[in-house]
Image (cartoon, rainbow, N blue to C red):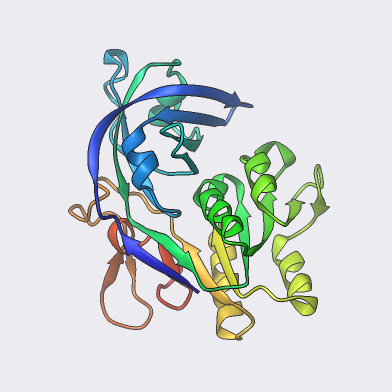
């Protein structure tokens, strides 16, 4: 269990690229100088970003998880998968170049009420849970991470998760790194012998449905990070609506999430 709250202060502000690292052909690791977001962001929150470079004007505001914050340096990190023109443009940014950010947005975790948490993560879904793992470790909570990808090259953010996990289990579909197989089987085997009080998942709808099942069976408290397309990030456009599981109507991922209890939402 955890305590969450909505963003208390949201601001559109200019940031600058502190460092940028291209990982393979699909991913970008960007650290941004932005004291406001670094100071106010909670684990689980996100930002909307827009470049300021005149040659990259077709980049709309896009949502990205705040992977990690460093308040002492006034910076935060994004892990981005290159999926189209907008994210490709992000990969072309240079050190000290300007970028505009709005945030922090969504609900974030203020405090935990668990002795142990698990993170079941697929690919770049790691970006949503790194800061969560960091906070849990700081509070003396055991962190067990199950990190899955199709191949070892897509285990993005592995070094950060390793730093903040008591135990890190690597699982790949092709067996190129870690355990060869399905991460759900690894989690199920773990739960037969040991306890995870709260299990968080991000990056895979299959994993989300699996965590819902574990939650229904009482094997752990399940929580889901939802990643939906959104145009505004503040609840106006309703582009990120997801159906409620226990009542009529919809949640908006940008303001009601992105973290939900496993029994709160329907996963298509």
Vertical placement of residue 61 versus 17, above or below: below
Viewer-side residue, 177 vs 219: 219
Who's the residue at 34% across and 75% down the image?
244
Q: How many marks?
A: 0
Can the viewer see residue 144 in this picture?
Answer: yes
Can the viewer see residue 155 in this picture?
Answer: no
Residue lying at the far front in this picture: please name it: 72
Who's the residue at 20% across and 52% down the image?
237
Q: Residue 117 location, x and y as percent?
A: 61, 67
Q: Residue 69 location, x and y as percent?
A: 47, 41
Q: Is residue 198 left or right of residue 189?
A: left
Quadrant containing the C terminus in the rendered view? bottom left
Who's the residue at 72% across and 42% down the image?
151
Q: Residue 253 location, x and y as percent?
A: 34, 59
Residue lying at the far left in this picture: please name it: 236
Vertical placement of residue 253 versus 80, above or below: below
Vertical placement of residue 252 versus 27, above or below: below
Viewer-side residue, 134 vs 148: 134
Q: Is residue 266 left or right of residue 185?
A: left
Vertical placement of residue 135 versus 142, above or below: above
Q: Is residue 220 left or right of residue 243?
A: right
Q: Residue 161 location, x and y as percent?
A: 64, 47
């Amino acid at each position: 269990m955890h305590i969450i709250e909505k963003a208390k202060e949201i601001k559109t502000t200019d940031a600058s690229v502190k460092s940028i690292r291209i990982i393979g052909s699909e991913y970008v690791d960007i650290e941004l100088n932005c004291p406001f977001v670094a100071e106010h962001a909670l684990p689980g929150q996100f930002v909307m970003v827009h470049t300021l470079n005149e040659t990259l004007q077709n980049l709309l505001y896009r949502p990205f998880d705040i992977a990690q914050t460093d308040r002492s340096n006034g910076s935060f990190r994004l892990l981005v998968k290159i999926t189209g023109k907008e994210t490709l443009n992000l990969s072309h940014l240079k050190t000290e170049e300007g970028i505009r950010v709005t945030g922090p947005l969504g609900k974030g975790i203020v405090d935990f009420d668990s002795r142990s948490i698990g993170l079941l993560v697929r690919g770049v879904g790691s970006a949503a849970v790194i800061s969560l793992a960091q906070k849990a470790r700081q509070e003396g909570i055991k962190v067990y991470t199950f990190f899955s990808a199709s191949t070892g090259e897509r285990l993005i953010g592995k070094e950060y998760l390793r730093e903040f996990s008591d135990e890190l289990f690597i699982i790949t579909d092709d067996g190129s790194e870690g355990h060869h197989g399905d991460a759900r089987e690894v989690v199920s085997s773990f739960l037969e012998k040991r306890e995870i009080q709260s299990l968080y998942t991000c990056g895979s709808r299959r994993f989300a449905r699996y965590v819902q099942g574990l939650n229904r069976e009482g094997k752990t408290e399940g929580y889901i990070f939802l990643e939906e397309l959104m145009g505004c990030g503040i609840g106006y456009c309703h582009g990120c609506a997801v159906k409620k599981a226990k009542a009529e109507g919809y949640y908006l991922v940008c303001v009601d999430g992105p973290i939900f209890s496993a029994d709160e939402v329907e996963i298509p």
